[in-house]
Every structure is written in structure tokens, then in C-alpha cells.
Image: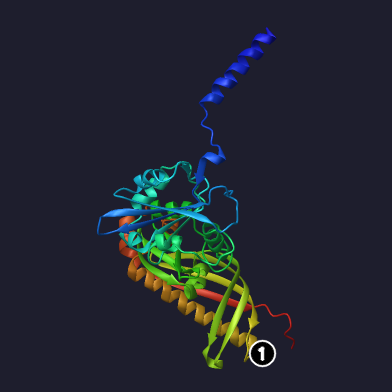
């Protein structure tokens, strides 16, 4: 009886193993990054796939990549067309990011992201980013970087999110796109002939790219959006005709609905002065003067940014979602009418952590 049971179990294992599709590494090509652009002349999508040079592991830091391009009237047919250019099966399970060209981002990301959401091989932790110009051009150039380009871009975005850049990924994009009272934002990449860099933040109205925040404004956006513990900020102290750099900044942000038509942002920030060429922070008087000046500067910039977002009727700070969480019988139509003129204020306290000051 026991022998018969063993035979049955072994038979089942053999049958089940025959039903599982195996993926032998030498027989597939692993796409590490995809790019999508829009061709308005032919009314079609242009797709780019970046794959490590055949024979290299997907974990390799070698710079050599194979670049494939294809054009189609539907985004989901791009992969099929790229597949016709290689004898090896293309897989996207190791995909690190998807770059969207500027023209396509302005047209709208809905069809692209719908195709992504239906692909179960693609993880929700990858990065979605907008490119100034065309993604195909950015992905096809030969840059002087230490790693292959997809890994370089992935680590570029990831490392900046540890500092002044707000956290976002594909999951966060879908959360903001489908949620009420909020709009998505994405990293905005740019490039020259020799380098790729983060230019700022792409702001979306629904699925359409409508505006951007520059690198210099990122700290303001992040302090309004989420807590931080390792940011830096360069302050132009006009009264002293000098620049002051504050680093190791930690900040917290809370929101308070004081009435149906008024929200307060309460922000506490602490940092260390790491550069102040023409001013010595060697007394409590100078320290207090600088703290007040920086607090006033950040408060004005925060309120200017919020007013700009209200004027454009986009909500990447998720103010509407907060309002919904605090309001009984919240209605989106009423919120859409209220948001552009809502009273939104900022209360900000800034403290310098300087242990070398004595009375």
C-alpha cells in the first residue's frame, strides 16, 4: 500500500511539473526598462525596450545594453513587435522602470498604464517617470555612467527620494489616479549628450502632464507632502547678502481642518547649518534671526505653491483626500468647486540645531 502511494505521488509530481512553464535564463531576454513616446504624424506609439547584453546577468553592472524599438497604433502591440526582432522570449518580470515621453505624457497615460496594470509580471514597486523630450532618445544614448542605464536611472530616483524628492512609484501613481481628492505626480527626467538627471517633478491632472516643479522647489513640495529626515535647503539670506545651506533636515507635517472651507498645514523643521560663508552662527541672537528669516521664506514659498496648484486645479498634495477623511457626506462635485478658492494656510516653525553656540 505504501509503495502504491509513493508511485501515485511521484506520478502527480511529474504531471504537474509538465504543466509549469519553465523560464531558462539562456532562452529569454529580460527587459530592465521600457520607454513610450507618441508619434502625432502617424497617430501611433513608439516603444523602446532596454535589455542587458545577451550573456550578461540581469544583475550585472556592465554598461552594455541592447536597445529595441517598435511602433504600433496600440501600446500593447509594442511588445509583440519587439518580439519579432529577437529569437529569445522577452520577459518583463525584472522591469525596473517605465519612461514616458513628454508628448505622450501631455496626451495622457491612461492606455499605457492600463496595459501595465493588466500585466501580472510587472511589480507595483517600479518607477514611472516623465522625460523631457523623447524617452527613446534618452534611453538610446551612450552616457558615461558606471552601471547599465536602467540600473543607473533606478538608483538615481531611489537615492533622491531619501532626500528632497517625494516618494512615488507605480503603486502610488495608481492610488492617486483612481483615488478621490488627489492627482498623481511623477519624477521628471532630462538629459544631455553625456548625462541623465532629475529635473524636478511632473504634475498631472488625472492622467495628463500639465505642469512641473523645478528641483529648487522640491524641498517645499516634500515638506508639505510627507515627513522627512535627511533633506537639505539653500536659503538666500538677502538681508545679509549671503547664502546659507541647512542640511540633515528633519521635518514633520500635520493638517488641520478648522472649518469646512479652511485647512492649516502645521510644519515643524529642524536642521543644521553646514555652510554660511559670510555669517557666523555664533550667538543665540544671530541664530534666532536666521530661524525667523528661514521660517518666513519657507512659509511664503509654501503658500505660493499651494495657491499655484489651486489656480491650476490640480491636487498632488492630496488635500482633497484629507478633506474627505474629515468631512461627513463629502461629495466630489462640491469639493471640485470649493478647492480653487479654499483658504489654505501654513504654520511653520524652523529650528537650527547648533550645539556650538554659547551665551
Residue 344 visible in the displayed image = no
Q: Position of residue 63 (x, y in %)?
A: 56, 59
For the point 34% across and 49% down, the residue is: 75
For the point 42% across and 45% down, the residue is: 117
Looking at the rendering, which quadrant does residue 209 occupy? bottom left
Q: Position of residue 114 (x, y in %)?
A: 37, 47
Residue pointed to by mark 1: 280
Q: Nearer the viewer, residue 290 or 348?
A: 290
Q: Residues within 10 Å of mark 1 (few under 14, many from 20)?
A: few
Task: Give the answer, above or below, for where 308 lies relative to 117.
Answer: below
Residue 175 visible in the displayed image = yes
Task: Give the answer, above or below, for where 296 lies relative to 310.
Answer: below
- Say whether residue 127 is left or right of residue 113: right
For the point 57% across and 49% down, the residue is: 58
Number of residue marks: 1
Looking at the rendering, which quadrant does residue 240 occupy? bottom right
- Say whether residue 11 is left or right of residue 203: right
Q: Position of residue 314 (x, y in %)?
A: 36, 64
Q: Nearer the viewer, residue 305 or 347?
A: 305
- In the picture as drawn, the residue positioned furthest to the top comes out as 1
Q: Position of residue 335 (x, y in %)?
A: 34, 60
Task: Give the answer, above or below, for where 179 lies relative to 263.
Answer: above
Mark 1: secondary structure: loop
Q: Nearer the viewer, residue 258 or 132?
A: 132
Amino acid at each position: 500500500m505504501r509503495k502504491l502511494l509513493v508511485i501515485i505521488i511521484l506520478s502527480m509530481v511529474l504531471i504537474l511539473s509538465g504543466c509549469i512553464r519553465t523560464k531558462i535564463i539562456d532562452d529569454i531576454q529580460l527587459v530592465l526598462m521600457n520607454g513610450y513616446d507618441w508619434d502625432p504624424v502617424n497617430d501611433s506609439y513608439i516603444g523602446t525596450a532596454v535589455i542587458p547584453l545577451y550573456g550578461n546577468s540581469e544583475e550585472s553592472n556592465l554598461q552594455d545594453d541592447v536597445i529595441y524599438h517598435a511602433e504600433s497604433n496600440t501600446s500593447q502591440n509594442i511588445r509583440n513587435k519587439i518580439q519579432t526582432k529577437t529569437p529569445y522570449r522577452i520577459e518583463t518580470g525584472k522591469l525596473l522602470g517605465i519612461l514616458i515621453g513628454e508628448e505622450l505624457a501631455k496626451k495622457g497615460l491612461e492606455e499605457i498604464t492600463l496595459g501595465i496594470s493588466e500585466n501580472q509580471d510587472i511589480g507595483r514597486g517600479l518607477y514611472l517617470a516623465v522625460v523631457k523630450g523623447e524617452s527613446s532618445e534618452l534611453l538610446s544614448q551612450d552616457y558615461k555612467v558606471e552601471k547599465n542605464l536602467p540600473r543607473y536611472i533606478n538608483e538615481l530616483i531611489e537615492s533622491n527620494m531619501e532626500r528632497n524628492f517625494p516618494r512615488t512609484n507605480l503603486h502610488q501613481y495608481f492610488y492617486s489616479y483612481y483615488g478621490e481628492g488627489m492627482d498623481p505626480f511623477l519624477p521628471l527626467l532630462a538629459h544631455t549628450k553625456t548625462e541623465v538627471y532629475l529635473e524636478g517633478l511632473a504634475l498631472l491632472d488625472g492622467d495628463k502632464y500639465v505642469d512641473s516643479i523645478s528641483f529648487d522647489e522640491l524641498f517645499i513640495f516634500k515638506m508639505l507632502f510627507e515627513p522627512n529626515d535627511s533633506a537639505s535647503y539653500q536659503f538666500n539670506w538677502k538681508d545679509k547678502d549671503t547664502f546659507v545651506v541647512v542640511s540633515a533636515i528633519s521635518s514633520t507635517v500635520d493638517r488641520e481642518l478648522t472649518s469646512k472651507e479652511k485647512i492649516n498645514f502645521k510644519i515643524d523643521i529642524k536642521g543644521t547649518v553646514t555652510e554660511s560663508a559670510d555669517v557666523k552662527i555664533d550667538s543665540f541672537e544671530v541664530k534666532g534671526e536666521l530661524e525667523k528669516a528661514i521660517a518666513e521664506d519657507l512659509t511664503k514659498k509654501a503658500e505660493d505653491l499651494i495657491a499655484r496648484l489651486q489656480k491650476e486645479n490640480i491636487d498632488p498634495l492630496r488635500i482633497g483626500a484629507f478633506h474627505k477623511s474629515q468631512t461627513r457626506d463629502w461629495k466630489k462635485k462640491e469639493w471640485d468647486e470649493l478647492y480653487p478658492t479654499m483658504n489654505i494656510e501654513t504654520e511653520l516653525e524652523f529650528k537650527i540645531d547648533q550645539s556650538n553656540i554659547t551665551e
